[in-house]
Amino acid sequence: MNETDTHDWLQERLARIEAGETLEAVLADLPAEEAGLVQLAAALKSVAYPGREASLVSAQRRELLRAAQKGKTMTIQPDPADAGGTRTRWGLRLTLLGGLAALFVCAFAVATLAGAVWWWRGGRLSEAQRGPTGGEVVVEARDPQSGAVSEARGLVEAQGDDGSWEVVRAGHVVTAGQRLRTGALSSATLVFYDGSQTRLGPNTEVTVEALDAQKSGPRVVRLTQWLGDTDHDVAPPSDPASVYEVNTPSGAGKAKGTFFHVSVTTVLIRFDVDEGAVEVTNVNVTVVVVAGQSTVIVVGQPPVTPMFRITGEGEVERTGATWRIAGQDFLTNENTVIVGNPQVGDWVAFEGRLFAGGTRYADRIVLLRRAIEDRFTFAGTVEAIGVLTWTISGRTVHVDDQTTIEPGLSVGDEVEIEGGVTLDGTLWASSIRRAATNRFQFTGVVQRMGAGSWTISGISVTVNVSTTIDAEIVAGDVVLVTGQILEDDTWLATSIQRATADTFDFVGVVVRTDPWNVSGVEFETDEHTDIDEGIRVGNRVRVRGRILADGTWLAERIMQLDEDRRHHVQFTARVQSIDPWVVGGISVTVDAQTQIEGVIEVDDLVTVKGNLLPDGTVLAKKITRVAEARSCADTSVIVSSVGDGQIVLLDGRTISLTESVNVEGTINIASVIVIRTCVGEGDQLVVVSIVVVFQLEGLPTPTPTPVTPSPAGDTSGEFTICHQPPGNPEQRHTIKVDGGALQGHLGHGDTLGPCGGDGEGDDDDD
């Protein structure tokens, strides 16, 4: 008997007992072993179950994920120096962990029984099972005709039969006909009975049109996505007649066992496929998008020919109409989504498409972190206040009209200063504020508004008559909240204002470090998070970071405030001299107690942590070499031939398969592969890995391609574009333009490649 059969009959017997049948009648036709399970379940019904501690749930979940990571059948091995490389999900599949097989057999009956009892009690989750910020819990759908909301962050709402919207949390049951939506800084995952999942990003709205996600037989999951971004992880079907379909206001996509992304805006729809294939249809035109490809539908038009995707992370080298990131150029226009206002030197993630001929177009550019050079923070005592300079613990700090200074500061106050270091060591303050108390400031989405407390991004915030609140704030608004954490861990708001920022900054007491929890707030860290050493539970810390688009709190800095931190200083800059030490123009004293991490040379980027002495000098406790991440891009391409030690791509490029290139999978003719290219020494692009993600039945027929401008800016040659006169989309027509005029056309809404569909002038007139 398989797991599904056992779960189904056990639920049926428990339901009969719940309906009033006697235990004897329910057990009458059961073998002894099955009867024993039902009797045990009946006895368990009277047992009072304590709520599971959230920290225990999180720890168990992390251990399971770590164990699963060890059982992956295929991994992408990043370049060792690629500290900031992207994490790409190309065809990863989890295998059974051999060491757990016997344990699974022994525990199966108990696990099945526990699941049945949970269902019998209504599948409700206790408050203790939820994270303190309303974060992740593990939820499963109870039957094929229902789904369940999981991992709800921020504001997640469901529409009732009367058309009204109500806030829902993890565990909410969804059936066919129900509509879900997320607000700003919010996200949710919808899980189905067969294991498929749909993840809703911020400002997303989806309707479940039809649902029968059975594990055997033809599965049916049909959704309509009205707006926003979704990720779909479709379980492999047991029946070829199965349907997993995402409809949009202009087109639809059908998938089998696949992982894909759908983005819907008011002007266009985009389907990106990471695994398998998706059939995308609009106005009676269907294209097949395979792993590594994207297609775009302009509202009312057919999907464009699928193009290969390019993704990655890297340093911004140029902005404007043409961005340069990770050593490669990307065209942009008004449809390019740019998040966070990144500038030259900042580190960004990017998504785009590779047009025939090699032209790259950026669909999305997202700021990940600001340039880290030449920044400082320190705490000290105000000794003098001037119009252009302040003296703080012996150090002169320059201020200007861009410096944010907390009102009411005076000589003798303990303050915290942040700013930049110029090449000559001058400190320019970006902000000066009183030294940290248990106060907070964060941006969040309003979920609930009460007379004495509000819930904002999962945090319960107390308000009173002294709280300043902007007028006409409603649920779903993004607000900036400032206040103080009281001794009883109450978060008392002093002001709640509308905001567009996406940061948090608060001081509290460490409750847990794995995962991090400070004064009841859980947040995530990554390899770029700067964490002071020696932080323990009970320490006071200051946590600063960014709130990601899906509502995740990502810490950028965790600073210890206890012990001898009163005049702590930290800055990151280039080493100008080692004997004596000069970093970013600042003289640094090094003694026998100073820890020096790594082999450090002149011109290396380092972080100095230490104390500011009364004479204004810096005594270093630790100097750490900053590992500078490599800019890398992942590009999908097709292999046209395979030779001895090299492959030839469909676009004519030849790639040598040297020992330095890590290859995952078997490369054949017509393989779709992802090539990771990183910026190496001398700014040269180096191939570091190749991953096979899909196998086509044969090579596609090549299509004519436009001439591509060279990276140096040569715009000679002609380009085929679809010209769309402003205000008259029905008059679009195919034309050719020279390279010098290309960007102007793209900037006004024209697109590369010929027009398609049934619009007037769609037959190529070139």
Image: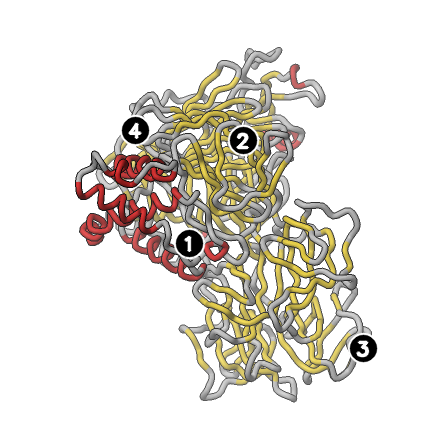
Q: Residue at x 42, y 33 (%)?
A: 273
Secondary structure found at label 2: loop
What label does residue 216 carry, if any? 4
Alpha-carbon distance for marks 4 and 1? 50 Å
Alpha-carbon distance for marks 2 and 3? 62 Å
- Other-residue count near label 4 (Cα within 10 Å), few / some / many at <14 / 14–19 / ≥20: few
Q: Quadrant of residue 493?
A: bottom right
Q: Does 300 sit left or right of 109 as displayed?
A: right
Residue bearing mark 3: 386
Q: Nearer the viewer, residue 212 or 674?
A: 212
Alpha-carbon distance for marks 4 and 2? 24 Å
Dot 3 amino acid type: Gly
Secondary structure found at label 3: loop
Residue bearing mark 2: 178
The tag earlier along the polypeptide, 3 or 4, is: 4
Q: Nearer the viewer, residue 412 or 583?
A: 412
Is there CB contact under 8 Å for labels 3 and 1? no
- Other-residue count near label 2 (Cα within 10 Å), few / some / many at <14 / 14–19 / ≥20: some
The tag earlier along the polypeptide, 3 or 1, is: 3
The tag earlier along the polypeptide, 2 or 3, is: 2
The tag earlier along the polypeptide, 4 or 1, is: 4
Q: Of the residues tagged 2 and 1, which is closer to the observer?
A: 2
